[in-house]
Image (tube, rainbow, N blue to C red):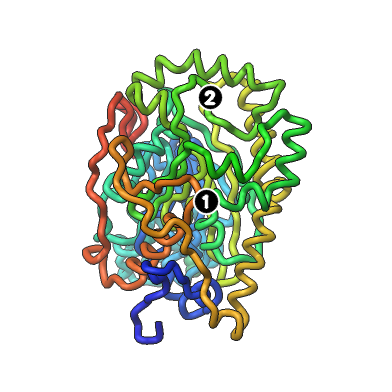
Amino acid sequence: MGTGKYIVIDPATGKLDRRIFSEQGIYDDEIQRIFGRAWLMIGHESLVPAPDDFFHTYMGEDPVILTRDGQGRLHALLNMCRHRGNRVVRCDDGSAKRFMCTYHGWTYRNNGSLEHVPGESEAYYDALDKASLGLIEARVETYAGIVFATWAKDAPSLEAYLGNARWYLDTVFNRRDGGMQALGPMKWLEPVNWKTLVDNCSDNYHVPTSHLSSAQVQTRWLGRPRLSHEDQFASPNKHAFVNGHSVTFRDADDNTPRYMHGMSKETVRLFQEYHEATMPEVERRLGTFRARRVQLANHSIFPNGILGLRLALPRGPLKTEFWHFVLLEQDAPEEIKHAIRVGSQANNGAAGMFEQDDVDNWRQVTAASTSRFARRHPQDLSMGLRHAGPHPDYPGLVSERYISENNQRLFYSRWEAFMNAQSWAQIPLDPITARFEGTATMRGSAGSPLP
Ligand code: FES
Ligand SMILES: [Fe+2]
């Protein structure tokens, strides 16, 4: 660093430079080179279900309006009036054909085009080039209802960006014909660097220690299996890494449903019945192997999508805005939706038990990096070095053990690749090699309307 080239992780030793968690200059480069370039999760189609609906979101620090225009097409529009820069939308969501700036009244259609300027003839002498003054628009693509956007004209397709990671993500997001619905978000601020929570998504090592007391409460009251290091070390679960995305998954053919917050001794029967009732549909959509053998667990989508539909929005090097959505299968029984909603909020979200355990760690990791003395000493991410590689059944780079820091090392290597690239042409992408059995597509179900 300092020469314009970022070398922050030593792949041979796993030593990581702590300055990346606190320095303003590095953060400024991240906003341009990562958040200005990557495909970013910005919302879900169910948040804008009807023509003329809109939802206010962010790409990095930039406010963006996700709209569905009168023809049903999605747009991601920078919330900045082209005149002097006021926000043209001041609320979280709604339905509107037009957005009027409250400074001088320039008015935009919900596809971004500038429709009306007060005094166009009288004040501007009909000389204003309205066609070039629409709201700045990002590229938008969807995957199974999740909306992504990028500012980079040279970015690859979202399909290529997700690559083989989609093979795993499908097992949650592309499971049902009816798709998913997003509730929320719950939003709050924490004094943590945004990367601390992304790298934690594949940190299975911390679970029995950090979450001991929360897990004991759940074991006692909800019947959750006891958490222990022994179980974690012996776990047949795996994690894999593709293009900066990390996925943890359970490899099991025991006809049990994927573990979700909201399962308890009272509700587990409901989840089991639902799992069995929907399995023929899931097998049709994903093929038998993925339907029966692959259960996605913690995961992250580069750069800042975490644990499903959750966002780590950067707000400076030492601050992150958390957005927590609950994602539900659209046509799941109401009792299951209720259990997942309650379980999700009990674990994650501002008052979630697990979340509070985690945030305390992330605060301290961030705070340590602000010390001029302490940050001379790098983080140690050496666990499982040289114990990952290709796997005959699973795409991506797969760790030998469920507990390792392969994903952290690879996440920070990916970070370096973005920070050092001049354009997308210099950012490597793994080829898509996975066999996508079944009928599920990028758009969810075949025949779903274009975004
Ligand atoms: S700043 Fe929006 S109309 Fe002037
Ligand atoms: Fe955790």
Residue 137 visible here: no
Say left or right for 40 vs 86. left
Q: Is residue 206 above or below residue 195?
A: above
Question: Which secondary structure lies at badge 2?
Answer: loop
Q: Quadrant for residue 184, please give it.
A: top right
Badge 1: how crowded within 10 Å, few (<14), some, or many (20+)?
Answer: many
Which residue is denoted by mark 1 in the rendering?
Answer: 201
Choose between 244 and 208: the one closer to the eye. Answer: 208
Location of the C terminus (image quadrant): top left
Residue 329, position in %: x, y? Answer: 51, 28
Residue 195 visible here: yes
Which residue is drawn at the image coordinates 37% and 28% (left, top)? 290
Which residue is drawn at the image coordinates 63% and 17% (left, top)? 269
Residue type at mark 1?
Answer: Cys
Residue 327, position in %: x, y? Answer: 54, 36
Choose between 123 and 110: the one closer to the eye. Answer: 110
Say left or right for 431 vs 356. left
Residue 100, position in %: x, y? Answer: 50, 56
Q: Which mark is residue 70?
A: none
Question: Which secondary structure lies at badge 1?
Answer: loop
Location of the N terminus (image quadrant): bottom left
Which residue is denoted by mark 2 in the rendering?
Answer: 257
Say left or right for 435 vs 15. left
Q: How many marks?
A: 2
Badge 2: how crowded within 10 Å, few (<14), some, or many (20+)?
Answer: some
Say left or right for 428 vs 175. left
Residue type at mark 2?
Answer: Pro
Which residue is drawn at the image coordinates 71% and 41% (left, top)? 215
| CA distance for labels 1 and 2 | 21 Å
Q: Is residue 276 above or below residue 246?
A: above
